[in-house]
Amino acid sequence: MEFTTYELAEFTNIRSTYAKTMYRLLKQWRTIGKKEFKIDDFKFLLNCPKSYSISDIDKRILKPIIKELAPYFKKLKVKKIKKNTRGNPVTGYLFTWKPEQTQHWIENNTA
């Protein structure tokens, strides 16, 4: 059985609500080191205002996320995923970081 533990000290140091939400989402993938979000899912999960354009998302959501979460996710980066059609619309975001190393789960371990 695997589970995610949030470091309370880390979480309480994060000021941006967008960064807090992304912290919770990315911690679930901490040992994988990457997570992709489709643009609609990303906007929904972060409760992004419908009026936000891609540049608003970059400036008001992604910059604070990268700035505040960089200490907790080593080498955190965000890459825009674009569709190769007219206008190159952004279809999602790929978050990557250095995966956390964990110890193997030992069944029936009472220690």
Image: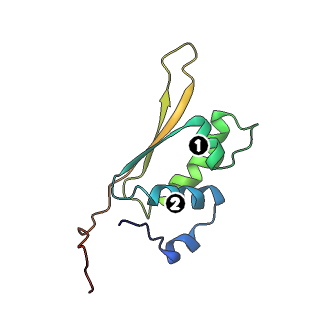
The answer to whether the residues at label 2 and label 1 have Cβ atoms under 8 Å apart is no
Residue 29 lies, with reference to residue 88, above or below; the image says: below
Q: Distance between the residues labelled 2 and 1?
A: 13 Å
| Residue at the (64%, 35%) spot, across then down | 55
Q: Position of residue 19 (x, y in %)?
A: 58, 58
Q: Which element type, helix, strand or loop, lies under badge 2? A: helix
The C terminus: image quadrant: bottom left
Q: Earlier in the sequence, mark 2 or mark 1?
A: 2
Three-letter code, disc 1: Phe
Q: Which residue lies furthest to the top in this view?
A: 86
Q: What element carries label 1?
A: helix
Q: How is the image coloured?
A: rainbow
- 14 over 57 or under it: above or below: below
Q: In which quarter of the view is residue 102 placed?
A: bottom left
Q: Residue furthest front?
A: 108
Point out the image quarter for the N terminus: bottom left
Residue 87's place in the image compared with 20, above or below, is above
Which circle marks residue 25 in the picture? none
Mark yes or no: residue 74 visible: yes
Residue plotted at (44% across, 71% down)? 5
> Label 1: which residue?
42
| Percent position of residue 110, x then y | 27, 85
Q: Which amino acid does label 2 sit on?
A: Tyr
* Label of residue 23 in the image: 2
**Mark 2 burial class by Cα count in 10 Å: few <14, some 14-19, many 20+:** many
Residue 72 x/y as whole percent: 43, 64
Give left or right: position of 35 versus 89: left
Q: Can residue 58 be seen in this view?
A: no
Neighbour class for label 1 at 10 Å: few (<14), some, many (≥20)?
some
